[in-house]
Amino acid sequence: MFRFVVVLSVLFLQDGLTASLGEDSNQRPNIIVIMADDLGYGDVGCYGGTAVPTPSIDRLAAEGMRFTSGYCSASTCTPTRYSFLTGTYAFRVPGTGVAPPNAAALIPAGTTTIASQLNEAGYATAVIGKWHLGLGEKGKGPDWNGTIKPGPLELGFDHCLLLPTTNDRVPQVYVADHHVENLDPEDPLWVGNKKPFPEYQSGVELRDSLRFDSMHGHRDTVYNGIGRIGFYTGGTAARFLDEDLADRWVEHSKAWLTQHKNEPFFLFFSSHDIHAPRVTHPRFENAGTTGPRGDMIAELDWCVGQLIDHVEELGLTKQTLFVFCSDNGPVLCDDYLDGSVEHLGSHDPNGPYRGGKYNVFEAGTRTPLITRMPDVIPVGVSDEMVCTIDLAASFSNLVGQPIPKDACLDSLDQIDVLLGHSGAVGREFLVEQDNGGSGNFGLRVGHWKLVRCKTSRMLNTGLRMSWNASPPLALYDLSNDPGETSNVIDTHPEIGQQLDQRLQQIIDEGRTRSTPSL
């Protein structure tokens, strides 16, 4: 029965895709997902931002569907990326919080992922950019000087060029498929969580020479004038400069797209912009009015434009579905004292929402989300609720690839909504998590939003990160209070109780796909 439903769905979608895909009905749409890092709802022009021009991202919106209730599933990078790839809420899997430099692979080899589904359907698949989901065997971690596996190639990707963790952590090297790129065996790479030798000069000793200081955490290794989390030595020939990251990934993506232009492809372009440390190529300096954070927004927008233009040069614009999103909401001072607070001015990265990275208020997970495929997706704005966790099931349905029963446990098929079909209805509910382990959750059902705070405090990511007191349960009516400023649980106790019970049920049941919706 499931296979029959999938075939009917594909036939239904085919009418809308025929104009773009030509006469060959067996051809399937190419897919490019561009995931920004720490980009807020209000950071780009098409969502109201004015501090930094974002013509390329705005172009996607002007030629496609812009979602006002587009979400990631978590307010930090590792759990969102886990959920995006696996279609399962990261809070269900212990150890999926922000990964340290030597973390082993968080997703076991052979796990069904968005990439493996598309690969089995005949797609060439690649991830280029930030990974931050661990590499190597459980209990061992990455073998930096040998074969690094499992990793993306054991999860359905044919190819990868990775920043292994995130650039405020070590090491500053690329992993190409199963090996560190350009590694000299005579200069082995060592990565650890403590000084390799007593005279090793860390960010504490070299503090006065740093490009910018940090509040407390980024003072282990100093490389390229920037303090990082973790220690490493060696691998000198393999190291990259922060300034070159975006250019390298764009160049490599273009080459890969050209190589696979005659077959269906899936590219996950995983940007590091606008995550700290905020160091761009010099040509983006002073691109806006908000300092280095704004410069990174400009660099991100340039990357988007380069991919759009290259697809057009290949003659594949009408055959390619673009999805633009972010892995979590914004943060200003993310430990580095880089001027992002002082240069903020009147710019509000949150837009109309409260919170940001690390918490479960709306700005932590409600981010820009845009889909674009000319002649298939109508130009417009949608208020339907969609989430990056749904892309696994949605793309599987799009290409007619059945999902195993025990996979993608929380990914709901939203392909009709993502393609802008008239009358298509988005999610009725969504669980929002922070980094995991805190017990803090948000549950949005329609216009109601429940915030459960197990620890009685919530990390605030405004001008300075701080812990703020928070009630165990809070209820917000987003239709009247999108900024979550007025807790109405005392006037609507029955709704608060119902949502709290439903949240616990979602957690306890272990899955939401193929279960009754609210």
Image (cartoon, rainbow, N blue to C red):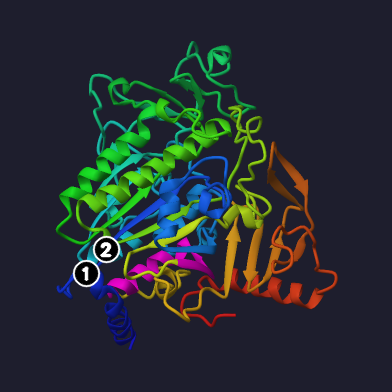
Q: Is residue 516 visible?
A: yes
Please state the horizontal and vertical placement of residue 279, each as a whole percent of the image: 47, 29
Residue 504, position in %: x, y? 65, 70
Q: Is residue 443 above or below residue 173?
A: below
Indicate left or right for 179 with 193 as reference.
left
Magenta run includes residue 499: no
Q: Residue at x 40, y 28 (%)?
A: 283
Q: Residue at x 61, y 28 (%)?
A: 339
**Magenta-tinted stretch:** 380-401
Q: Secondary structure at mark 2?
A: helix
Does dot 1 land on a helix, a strand or a loop?
A: helix
On the image, which quarter does residue 134 sit in?
A: top left
- Position of residue 499 relative to residue 371, above or below, is below
Q: In the image shown, does 118 or 43 lie closer to the viewer?
A: 43
Task: Name the amino acid, label 2.
Answer: Lys
Residue 21 numbered tag: 1
**Numbered badge on residue 369:** none
Which residue is the extreme one toward the right?
490
Q: Mark 1 and mark 2 in contact (Cβ < 8 Å)?
A: yes
| Quadrant assignment for the C terminus | bottom right
Give how far across and how far down residue 123 sits, in percent. Answer: 22, 62
Whichever of labels 2 and 1 marks the residue nearer the N terminus, that label is 1
Tell me: 117 left or right of 371.
left
> Which residue carries the number 2 mark?
318
From the image, which quarter does the N terminus lie in? bottom left
Q: Residues within 10 Å of mark 1 (few under 14, many from 20)?
A: many
